[in-house]
Image (cartoon, rainbow, N blue to C red):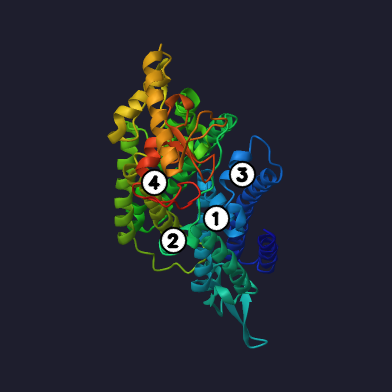
């Protein structure tokens, strides 16, 4: 952040030195705005790191399970930074940082490739050409004056601005893609594996998730409406007809986003989820709503695919105007914002809400909601539909058959006790003091289910017996801490 502040001060200095050239003023102003946004995002993450540090320093009954679950991450600063900043609640922070990084990269490339027209008039006394601050039209009307194009990077201190930007761009992109870059080698080198940060759920977070989710949804709706106005003006002002398909696909995308997040905002404000874990943080809340199986989400998924097709077609059809020598022009905005970044965002959204959803139906958390006082549970795994229906029905306040339940619990406890004694891996959990979830199926662990076990590596590493039994058929390590077991 200190380095970015120095960059901002230097940009102000360069703008004051080249205050006669509007293009350089625009460039420096945009650089300052982008860097201020980066500082705000980094400052927010810094505050979150301070909060995590305070939790680790002052351990109490509330945060002790979270500290113990992440004890391996505290042994490496690099792994902790990557795992902690990779939590789902920082998704929009990472998208904003990614957008600012690409914008700075685009601006720096444009400065090195662009030229600025300067009015040069001949001075008969000194017999040389002197620079004048004339407009192009006035310059052409003046006697002994002509317009010459100069490389933008040759202006005072402008090249130094671009050189100072490169370390910032590289560091931000490396931090954003660190997990992606490490994953291809993780299967070959176990030391490179980064465990996900386990954030313990607390009912206090529910109200925070609701207010944050509503605020984020409102902010996205507002930004989409602003983008709609800007893009509409852009289609009117630009003379490049090859951009119409690209800009039109961008308009449809922002209309789609505004409609979807308006529905999300309505859902957050008017409905209540059956599963408390939907309120773990605002991003999980938004994801669980978008993963629901209904017509609106199906329309959203189809709209994303349609936008990706038209964006690809528009990008291939789009051509820059012949005259695009300025640093800032319509063509640069269309090519970057409507083309490159739009394509990246659509790819991320399609992966998250179409590919990932269909490939991980047993692991995603779906927003199960109350309808007029009656409960309705949506299945996240079709193969275990009957088991999930039994769990959903067990949550409805009905009068249970105590004899049947006691008989099932006794048989299950005997089975678990036998396995615990024979393999010394499982241990029956009779009392759960903290709210926890099975990391394999993501269902909440309750003693009433009579199938909760913990592994010997740690008493907080608890799972459903059937889940961990199936897990050990394919894996030999604990899902939480990766402790290896010798299984016969």
> From mark 3 to mark 4, how far is it between C-alphas?
29 Å
Other-residue count near label 1 (Cα within 10 Å), few / some / many at <14 / 14–19 / ≥20: many
Q: Secondary structure at mark 3?
A: helix
Q: Is residue 375 visible?
A: no
| Looking at the image, residue 206 lies above or below residue 328 | above
- Tell me, for residue 82, which label it has, or none: 1
Horizontal and vertical percent for residue 480? 49, 46
To which residue does mark 4 refer? Answer: 352
Q: Secondary structure at mark 2?
A: helix
| Looking at the image, residue 127 lies above or below residue 358 | below
To which residue does mark 3 refer? Answer: 67
Q: Is residue 446 visible?
A: yes
To which residue does mark 2 refer? Answer: 186
Q: Secondary structure at mark 4?
A: helix
Viewer-proximal residue, 143 or 6? 6
> From mark 1 to mark 3, how far is it between C-alphas?
17 Å
Q: Quadrant of residue 387?
A: top left
Q: Secondary structure at mark 1?
A: helix
* Earlier residue among tags 4 and 2: 2
């Amino acid at each position: 952040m200190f380095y970015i502040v120095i960059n901002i001060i230097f940009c102000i200095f360069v703008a004051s030195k080249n205050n006669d050239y509007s293009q350089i003023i625009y460039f420096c102003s945009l650089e300052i705005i982008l860097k201020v946004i980066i500082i705000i995002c980094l400052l927010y993450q810094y505050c979150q790191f301070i909060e995590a540090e305070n939790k680790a320093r002052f351990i109490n009954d509330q945060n002790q399970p979270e500290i113990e679950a992440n004890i391996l991450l505290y042994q490496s600063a690099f792994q902790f930074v990557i795992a902690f900043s990779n939590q789902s609640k920082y998704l929009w922070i990472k998208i904003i940082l990614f957008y600012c990084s690409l914008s700075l990269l685009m601006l720096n490339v444009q400065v090195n490739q662009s030229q600025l027209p300067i009015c040069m008039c001949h001075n008969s006394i000194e017999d040389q050409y002197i620079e004048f601050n004339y407009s192009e039209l006035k310059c052409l009307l003046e006697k002994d004056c002509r317009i010459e194009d100069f490389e933008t990077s040759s202006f005072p201190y402008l090249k130094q601005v671009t050189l100072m930007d490169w370390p910032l761009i590289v560091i931000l992109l490396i931090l954003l893609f660190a997990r992606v870059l490490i994953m291809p080698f993780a299967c070959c080198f176990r030391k490179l594996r980064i465990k996900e940060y386990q954030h313990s759920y607390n009912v206090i977070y529910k109200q925070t998730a609701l207010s944050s989710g509503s605020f984020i949804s409102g902010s996205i709706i507002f930004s989409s409406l602003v983008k709609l106005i800007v893009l509409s003006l852009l289609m009117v002002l630009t003379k490049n007809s090859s951009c119409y398909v690209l800009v039109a696909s961008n308009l449809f995308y922002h209309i789609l986003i505004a409609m979807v997040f308006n529905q999300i905002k309505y859902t957050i404000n008017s409905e209540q989820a059956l599963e408390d874990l939907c309120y773990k943080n605002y991003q999980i809340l938004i994801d669980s709503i978008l993963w629901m199986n209904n017509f609106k989400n199906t329309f959203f998924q189809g709209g994303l695919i349609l936008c990706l097709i038209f964006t690809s077609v528009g990008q291939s059809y789009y051509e820059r105007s012949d005259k695009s020598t300025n640093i800032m022009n319509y063509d640069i905005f269309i090519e970057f914002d409507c083309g490159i970044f739009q394509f990246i965002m659509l790819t991320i959204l399609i992966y998250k809400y179409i590919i990932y959803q269909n490939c991980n139906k047993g692991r995603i958390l779906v927003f199960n909601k109350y309808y007029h006082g009656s409960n309705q549970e949506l299945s996240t795994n079709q193969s275990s539909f009957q088991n999930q229906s039994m769990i959903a029905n067990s949550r409805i306040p009905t009068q249970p058959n105590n004899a049947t339940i006691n008989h099932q619990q006794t048989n299950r406890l005997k089975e678990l006790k036998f396995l615990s004694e024979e393999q010394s891996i499982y241990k029956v959990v009779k009392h759960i003091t903290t709210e926890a979830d099975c990391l394999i199926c993501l269902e909440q662990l309750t003693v009433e289910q009579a199938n909760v076990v913990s592994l010997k590596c740690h008493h907080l590493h608890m799972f459903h017996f059937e889940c961990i039994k199936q897990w050990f058929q394919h894996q030999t390590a604990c899902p939480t801490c990766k402790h290896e077991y010798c299984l016969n």
